[in-house]
Structures are given as C-alpha cells and as structure tokens.
C-alpha cells in the first residue's frame, strides 16, 4: 500500500505541474504580455491597462477566498475544468476588446480562471497526498509555474507577433482547456481516503481535528506576520513583473524582453531546486523565505542601476527570478511547519487570498511609478522585498 499511495500521489503532482504551467502561463505571466500588447495595439494609456491587470488579480483574490468552498461544493475536477475554460475565454476577451469596458469585462473571466489554477488550487491538489514529503511534492508541482513562464512568456510574444493577439489567445487557451480537462478527470478527482490509502504511503494518521475558526487565526501573531510578509513580497513581485516586458523592450526589443521574462522563470526553477535541498527537517522556513526575499532585493537594485546595459539588465532579471518561484511555494510550507495539519488548508487559503487582494493593486501602483520614474519602480520593489524579509524574521 505504501508504494501504491506514493505512486499515485506523484501522478497527482505531475498533473498539478501541468495545471501550474498553464495557470501561471495564462494568469500570472500572461497579463504583463497582455498589457504590452494592448498598449501597443490599442494605444490606450498605461494607467488604464494597468488598472485592468489590477482588476484581473483582484477578481482572482475574491475567487481564491471562496476556492475551498467551491472545491467542497463542486469538486476539484469541475472547478479546475471551469477555471481552464474561464482563463481561455478571458485571454480571448483581452485580445478582442474594442473598448475599455470590454477589457474590464474580460478580466472577470481571466481572474476567475487564474484563481482556479493558481497557488491555492495547486496546494489543494497535492497536499492530501503528502505530509512528510510535502516540501518536495509542493516544490515539484510549483515548478510548473516556472515552466509556464519559461515557455509561455516568449511563446505569447512570438505568437502575437506572428498571428496576432486574437489567434495567440485562441491557440494557447484551446491547448489549456484540452490538457486540463483530461488531466483533471484522470488524476484530480481521487483522494487517498477514497482509494484506501494514506499520505506518503504510511500508516493511518491520527484523527484530524476540526478546522480552526478564521477569527482565531486573525488574532494569531504567526499568521498575521505570514500574511503581511506574503502580501508585501508579492506586491513588489507582481508590480515589477507586470511591467517587466514593457520596461525591458526599449533596451532588448520585444522578443528579447519576452526571452528575458523566460530567463526570470528559468532562474525560478533553479531557486526552487536549491530551496528544496535547503529545507531539511529542522530548518526554519521563515528564515529561508527571508533569505529568498534578500536575493530579490539584490535583483531589483541591479535593475535600477543597470542604466539600460543589457548585461546588467539580464543579471538583475536572473537575481530577481531566483526568488520568483519560492515566493509562492514557501507560504504553504511555512504554514505546515507553524500550524497544525488541520489548520493548514484554511491558513493557506487565507494567506493566498489576502496576498492576491493586496497585489491586485500592484500593477496600477507600479504603473504610476513607471510614468513618474522607472528607476523608482525598481527601488520600490527592492524596499518592499526587504520589508517582507524583516517581517518574516520577527517572532
């Protein structure tokens, strides 16, 4: 039974990996490319399109807050399939919007699709199958997020340049629906209990306690510090990433900027692989996450001081990218270390929802900084990442 549980659990991880490839490639790394494409194609001001990116993430935050309830009511299979369809239709809406109100209508679909295939969704897919080996399993599944950036960021740029935004959205969205529809039905509808198995293939765990009351969590200092650090770090990260292609395009060209975005997410895989080795039993995961933010501070400062030099720009992108993946995969692992197993799903859902609600405003805020002074954008990102690290180190 040990081998059967572990074998199917790792099949779920591989399925979640593919969900993350499309989820992040469409919902996280897609909007920065969409922003640049809409600005160039429609001639709309940066603040308007930045506000649409904000709307995309804000809608996603609202859906994430309800995701656990949706999973219980409709099941992970149906919610994941609906998320894939919603994301595909939302991207097509971005491409075809002829008026600003149509663009904001599209964000309702793209944001909901991102929530159903993002961090909280991946955690819900993988966590039931692992307790002892959860850091490795979560890290492997979240590597799909980085692959989504490595592959889909430059693919979006190439396809938009080749066949136009509309056809690019149709092709990538169609592939997402087909892949996730099958994978969800094949692997995500089962649980260890339903198959007579246990997490990690081990002996039955002790009876689970009732999930904690949300009001009690909001009075827990550990939870509040985790929420604050996650929100600060992701606000900085999303704010910079949302404008990264547009900021790099003058120096590197549109295609070069897309490849640089791919470099950032390739480095995210390396960063997550290093973190998986660091997180041995007994290692303080909050300190590890703080160090991860520190590397991103160095990246933001390098970008600020690059002065348009391609080599320094790429170095800054690489340093910042090393922390991209861990920023989303570390909070669930910190929650596992700091809270009871029965508390983890609620803690993760609330951390993700509050973080997304905060960073939803980052593209618009950083868009204003970009208009005033691009260097101020990089400085703000570094300062926020440093503050997030300090918050995590508090006890």
Image (tube, grey):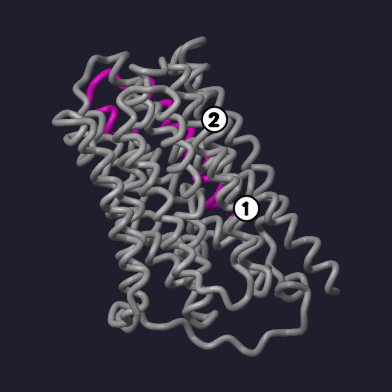
Residue 68 shown left or right of residue 175 in the figure:
left
Residue name at image x 63 percent, y 48 percent: 17
Residue name at image x 51 percent, y 83 percent: 340
Q: Which residues are magenta?
A: 77-106
Q: Secondary structure at mark 2?
A: helix
| Image height of 353 relative to 157, above or below | below
Foreground of the two, 87 or 232: 232
Q: Quadrant of the C terminus?
A: bottom left
| Residue 361 percent across, percent down from the top left | 24, 46
For marks 1 and 2, give the one nearer the viewer: 1
Check if residue 62 falls in the magenta segment. Answer: no
Gap in Å between the C-alphas at discs 1 and 2?
A: 21 Å
Residue 235 shown left or right of residue 267 in the figure:
left
Residue 288 shown left or right of residue 375 in the figure:
right
Q: Quadrant of residue 146?
A: top right
| Image height of 338 relative to 192, above or below | below
| Residue 367 percent across, percent down from the top left | 22, 34
| Image height of 129 relative to 15, above or below | below
Label placed on residue 273: 1
Label placed on residue 315: none
Q: Please, what is the dominant secondary structure of the magenta stretch?
A: helix
Label placed on residue 152: 2
| Residue 242 percent across, percent down from the top left | 34, 36
Upstream in sequence: badge 1 or badge 2: 2
Q: Secondary structure at mark 1?
A: helix
Q: Categorize mark 2 by other alpha carbons within 10 Å: few (<14), some (14-19), many (20+).
A: many
Check if residue 97 falls in the magenta segment. Answer: yes
Is there any visible trace of residue 181 in the rendered image? yes
Is there any visible trace of residue 58 in the rendered image? no
């Amino acid at each position: 039974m040990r081998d059967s549980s572990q074998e199917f659990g790792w099949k779920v991880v591989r399925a979640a990996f593919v969900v993350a490839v499309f989820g992040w490639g469409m919902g996280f790394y897609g909007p920065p490319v969409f922003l640049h494409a809409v600005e160039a194609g429609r001639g709309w001001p940066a603040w308007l399109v930045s506000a649409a990116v904000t709307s995309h993430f804000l809608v996603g935050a609202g859906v994430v807050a309800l995701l656990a309830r949706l999973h219980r009511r409709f099941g992970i299979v149906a919610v994941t399939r609906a998320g894939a369809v919603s994301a595909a239709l939302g991207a097509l809406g971005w491409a075809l919007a002829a008026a600003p109100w149509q663009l904001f209508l599209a964000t309702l679909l793209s944001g909901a699709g991102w929530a159903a295939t993002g961090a909280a969704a991946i955690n819900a897919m993988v966590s039931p199958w692992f307790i002892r080996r959860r850091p490795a399993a979560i890290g492997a599944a979240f590597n799909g997020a980085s692959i989504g950036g490595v592959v889909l960021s430059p693919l979006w740029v190439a396809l938009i340049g080749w066949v136009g935004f509309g056809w690019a959205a149709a092709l990538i969205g169609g592939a997402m629906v087909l892949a996730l529809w099958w994978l969800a039905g094949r692997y995500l509808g089962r649980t260890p209990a339903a198959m007579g198995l246990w997490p990690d293939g081990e002996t039955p765990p002790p009876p689970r306690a009732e999930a904690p009351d949300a009001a009690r969590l909001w009075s827990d200092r550990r939870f509040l510090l985790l929420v604050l650090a996650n929100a600060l770090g992701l606000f900085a990260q999303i704010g910079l990433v949302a404008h990264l292609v547009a900021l790099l395009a003058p120096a590197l060209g549109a295609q070069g900027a897309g490849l640089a975005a791919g470099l950032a997410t390739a480095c995210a895989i390396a960063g997550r692989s290093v973190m998986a080795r660091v997180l041995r039993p007994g290692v303080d995961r909050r300190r590890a996450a703080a160090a991860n933010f520190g590397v991103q501070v160095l990246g933001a400062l390098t970008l600020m001081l690059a002065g348009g030099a391609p080599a320094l720009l790429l170095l800054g992108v690489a340093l910042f990218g090393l922390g991209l993946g861990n920023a989303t995969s570390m909070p669930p692992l910190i929650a596992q270390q700091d809270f009871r197993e029965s508390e983890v799903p609620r803690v993760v859902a609330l951390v993700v929802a509050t973080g997304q609600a905060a960073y939803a405003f980052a593209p618009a805020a950083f868009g204003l900084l970009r208009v005033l002074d691009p260097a101020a954008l990089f400085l703000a990102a570094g300062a926020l990442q440093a503050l997030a690290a300090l918050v995590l180190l508090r006890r």
